[in-house]
Each structure stands twice: as C-alpha cells, then as structure tokens.
Amino acid sequence: MTFSVPPADPATAAAHFRARLSFETDVSDVHAALEAGTPGLVVVDSRGDAAWRQGHLPGAVHLPTAEIAARGAELVPVGSTVVTYCWGPGCNGATRAALEFARLGRPVKEMLGGFEYWAREGLPVVTPTGTVRRRADELTAPRSAVACDC
C-alpha cells in the first residue's frame, strides 16, 4: 500500500503512542479505575452547572474550567491524579481543563470521548432523579458488555 506520507519507523511510532497514552485515557479505563477505587484518582467534570445537572459520572468533582485556576488546588489534593472530561470529542473543554491542572502542578489525563461516550457505552450517569444507564450504543461498545475489549 502506498501512503502520501510513509509510516514512522517503529521506534519513533512507539515513542509517539506511549506519549499519547500518558496524556489521554478512555472511558473504559476510567470506569475500571473508579470501580477499583484507585487511590488518589480525581475525575473532574469541567462543564457548566446546567450540564452537570443533566448528568455526570459517579464520583466526579464538578469544577468548570474557568474556576480551576482559582479552586483546583483546594479541591484536588497534592499527590492526586486528575482525569478531566467535558461533553465529548467535539469539545476541547477537557483539554483546556487538563492544561489548567497541569499548570497547578497536578498529574493529569484527558478522558477521550467525554461524557458523551461514557453515556453511549452504557456506563452509569448520575442525574437529579438518581443513577441511570443507557443501553450501550453498538457503534461505541458491544451491547452485551461494558468494555470495548480493546
């Protein structure tokens, strides 16, 4: 097969993909970490109040991006690992939130797919009326499982 740009050599590719994985995580891995009670994990929903009320991840801390610089250090203890999320792949709010936490000196990852993919994969969502689960979207996860088996 001919590509307009050839693939990188294996060592360069390995360094690139390892670096990406140090900055990003996915909803399946975050769900597993929350279920396991991973010590020091703080999941931050960086959306606004209306979005938070519409639904959020169980155990998430609500801290809109604009408030992280002022309140992030008090809400996220030193030594914690932060995972940020926003609406979904069409939004870079989680990226901006991750940048703010990095500026505060906190280890941080961005959750790819955001709230959208969390809900689409059938994972629990906390709403004002309780915790709900949508049926898994077969375009994001197998209907019979919570994880994508990647």
Image (cartoon, grey):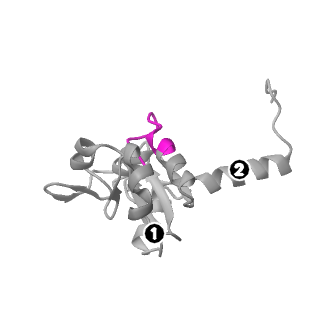
Residue 72 percent coordinates (x, y): 42, 57
Residue 106 percent coordinates (x, y): 54, 60
The part of the image, by quadrant, that contains residue 116 is top left
Residue at screen point 31% across, 62% down: 58
Q: Is residue 72 in view?
A: yes
Furthest residue in direction left, as rendered: 129
Closer-to-camera residue (100/95): 100
Residue at screen point 49% across, 55% down: 148
Identify residue type, mark 2. Answer: Phe
Quadrant, the N terminus: top right
According to the image, label 2 marks what residue? 17
Quadrant, the C terminus: bottom right
Q: Residues within 10 Å of mark 1 (few under 14, many from 20)?
A: some
Disc count in the image?
Answer: 2
Q: Secondary structure at mark 2?
A: helix
Which label's residue is closer to the chain start, 2 or 1? 2
Q: Point out the stretch of residues depicted in magenta.
A: 85-96
- Verify whether residue 135 appears in magenta: no
Residue at screen point 40% across, 56% down: 44
Residue 23 percent coordinates (x, y): 60, 52
Q: Residues within 10 Å of mark 2 (few under 14, many from 20)?
A: few
Q: Compute the Cα span from label 2 to label 1.
A: 29 Å
